[in-house]
Image (cartoon, grey):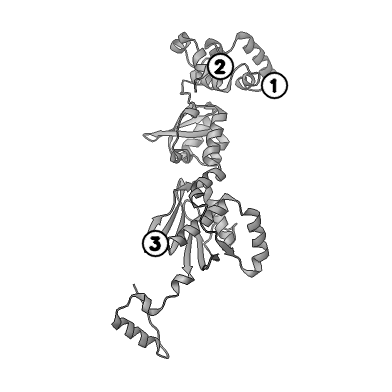
Amino acid sequence: MEDRALNTVKPAARRTFIPRKKLGEVLIETGLITVQHLTEALKLQKDTGKRLGDILIEKKFISEEEMAFALALQLKIEYIDLSEHTIEQRIIEIIPRETAVRFACVGISINNNILEVAMADPRDLNMIKDLQFITGYNIKPAISTASQIQDILQKHYNPVKSLSDVTKEFENDEVLEFLPEEKKEEEETHSAEEFKDSPFVKMVDLIIRNAIKRGASDVHIEAQENHVRVRNRIDGVLQDSMPKLPKWTQPIIISRIKVLGGMDISERRLPQDGRIKVRSKNMSVDLRVSTLPTYYGEKAVIRILNKDETSLKIKDLGLNPRSYTTISSFINQPQGMILFTG
């Protein structure tokens, strides 16, 4: 996108600009506003206490992009047009969602432990210090417009859009029916009806459905430093079952699992156990759920007990004839115990 700000700045101003001039002087020197515009805006600033830049934009003397460009010149930092940038999801997620929204900022690149952050107002030194503390990186401020930053945050942190992208390929899979305990049936039915279209309900359904479909014995939903990892245990080996999920989805997904398992969603400091019954077509599955606190937040482990798969006859276990005969004779004894170890 070609910016009017870049085209209207006088060439001499680009070469000889002296930093830290007042913003009004920068705007006049670059040819972005007139002296008359500045005089009118300064008068309004005195009467209202608003920032000069906000007044100039409100009066349509200057665009939001031009103001950001002028601030970049004043502060000697880079102006970033986010509409022309592709930012990796992993870099965006370094700054927690709540922090990014509160500060109107977004991480755009990393180089040698330096995180470059596009900000709507890089003059806020306390914000930069907070970002360094929260992320653990040295911060290199850049400037962009508040509206472009907001667009990026909505695109990458919007739960409906991002989770829908993850679940899209499974839309035609069979639907799971969660069977609540009798004493909670009325409450759970109301809850399921109210939230059946929630992306988080669909996400938990997908996690469980995918694990059952792949023959997993366990599902691990693990809180990591900057994301949520979902793994299935198949043939004794833990395997990633889907792309990494944004970090901010973790407490909501865990809460959904707690609701299904009849656990206390407000208790996050102590381990909890629960159980879920699932029915799909002619298959019935019991789930044993455990949640426990970890350094990066709560994790959940779901043990899958497929009644159809576990109802095997002895002859289907793959025993050699001698072992089969021995075990069969033991089973017919009136007392005793058979112990299998691995």
Q: Earlier in the sequence, mark 3 or mark 2?
A: 2
Percent coordinates x, y for residue 158 in the rendering: 55, 42
* Residue 325 figure quarter: bottom left
Residue type marked 2:
Leu
Residue type marked 3:
Ile
Mark on residue 48?
1
Q: Earlier in the sequence, mark 3 or mark 1?
A: 1
Percent coordinates x, y for residue 52 in the rendering: 62, 19
Percent coordinates x, y for residue 132 in the rendering: 46, 36
Check whether the beta carbons of the residues at disc 3 and disc 2 lie within 8 A of each other.
Answer: no
Kindly identify the residue that appears in the image at 45 percent across and 58 percent down: 220
Q: Nearer the viewer, mark 3 or mark 1?
A: 3
**Disc 2 marks which residue?**
23
Q: Earlier in the sequence, mark 2 or mark 1?
A: 2
Q: CA distance from mark 2 to mark 1?
A: 18 Å
- Looking at the image, which is closer to me, 48 or 245? 245
